[in-house]
Structure formats: structure tokens, C-alpha cells
Image (cartoon, helix red, strand yellow):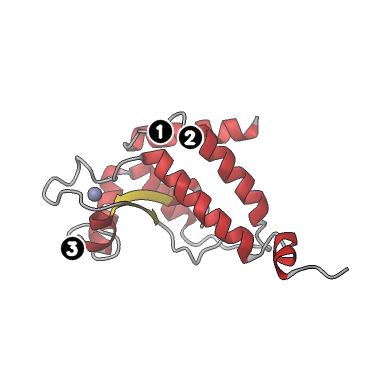
Amino acid sequence: MTLSKLQKKKNNTSSTYWKTKCDTAWGALIHAMYNVCAMENVDVTDPCAGNLEAHHLISRGRIVTRHSPECGVLLCSKHHKFSKICSPHASPIGFSRFMEIHRPVQYAWVLEHLHDTQESRPNYKERLVELEYLLHSTTCVSRYANDDKWKEICDAASAAEAD
Ligand SMILES: [Zn+2]
């Protein structure tokens, strides 16, 4: 019996088929976790505008942290790509300062994991199960946006995952 191309991709847990599904689930998780732009009510000099977008704090090219909930922050499109004061794409240093001041716990996580590398082939199919579980548990506790709450929610999500 010969397998179709699609079936071969499904059988390979490191394939782009599963990777793409993880990307989508990760984005949905970041949206569910935060619901509002991280800079809403913080950066009053440059108000929010546009759609909400999930931003990777560590480059997407780093496969090992690409789908970590801690790696994501939700930003409106202005604060994601266009603000010359504080967006990660137009003002990386301004954004870094924002993280350091307003999300110190998550900022410390980023510094700790900035150079993490993948040791073996990633199992995206397994990651997808974890992401979908986190998404399910997160939708119950969404609508938080401050840094104190962040660690609490991440710990709760991890504890739920371990059950
Ligand atoms: Zn914004």
C-alpha cells in the first residue's frame, strides 16, 4: 500500500503539517490569554489601533520556544508593527524597555530562554495536544493583562496540564 503525501505528513510528527497547526493553536492561545493589547492603558501617549496580533518575544526561528505560552504577547497592530515609540518591529529598544518595566517576570523568562536550542526533532503533534489543552483551560481564566497575574495563570495552566 502506498501512502498519500498528506498521510505521510500526518504520520511524521515533526512535519510542517503539525507545525502549522501548532502555530495556529499558539496564536489562539495568546489571544485567549490576554484579550487586550499589552499596552492598553499603559502607553497613553500612543493609543492602541488596529487588530490584535500575537507577537513572539523570542524569534519564531527558535523552534524550542516557538510554541511556549510564555513566549507570546498580544499587541494591537500599531503597537506590534508601527509605533516608533514602543513597537517590537519599529522600535525594538522601546519595546524591550516596555517589557522590562511593565512585565518584569515575563521579561526575565525571555532573558533566561533567549538562547535555548532544540536538542532533538520536535514532536509537533504532542505540542498540539498541550496547546489545545492550555487553550481550553485558559478560556476560563482569560481577560487578564498585568504582569502579576501572568505568572499565576501560567502556573495554574501548568498545574492543570500535569493533572
Ligand atoms: Zn496597543
Judge whether 150 appears above or below 43 on screen: above
**Circle 1 sits on which residue?**
142
**Circle 3 sits on which residue?**
84
Distance of label 2 from label 3 (alpha carbons)? 32 Å
Q: Quick one: which residue is furthest to the left in this view?
A: 45
Judge whether 114 appears above or below 102 on screen: below
For residue 63, which quarter of the picture? Answer: bottom right
User: Is 133 left, or right, of 145 in this rendering?
Assistant: right
Can you see residue 93? yes
**Circle 2 sits on which residue?**
138
For residue 90, which quarter of the picture? Answer: bottom left
Q: Earlier in the sequence, mark 3 or mark 1?
A: 3
Q: Please name which of the two marks, 3 or 1, marks the residue nearer to the observer.
A: 1
The quarter of the picture where the C terminus appears is top right
User: Is 115 left, or right, of 55 in this rendering?
Assistant: right
Q: Percent from the top left, x then y, of residue 113?
A: 49, 55
Q: Earlier in the sequence, mark 2 or mark 3?
A: 3
Q: Are marks 2 and 1 in contact (CB under 8 Å)?
A: yes
Can you see residue 65? no
Q: Please name which of the two marks, 2 or 3, marks the residue nearer to the observer.
A: 2
Question: At 43% across and 36% down in the image, what residue appears?
Answer: 151
Distance of label 2 from label 1 (alpha carbons)? 6 Å
User: Is 5 left, or right, of 110 in this rendering?
Assistant: right
Disc 2: residue Cβ within 8 A of ligand 1's nearest atom: no
**Which amino acid type is marked by label 1?**
Ser
Q: Which mark is residue 42?
A: none
**Which amino acid type is marked by label 2?**
Thr
The quarter of the picture where the N terminus appears is bottom right
**Which amino acid type is marked by label 3?**
Lys
Question: At 32% across and 37% down in the image, what residue appears?
Answer: 145
Question: At 20% across and 60% down in the image, what residue appears?
Answer: 83
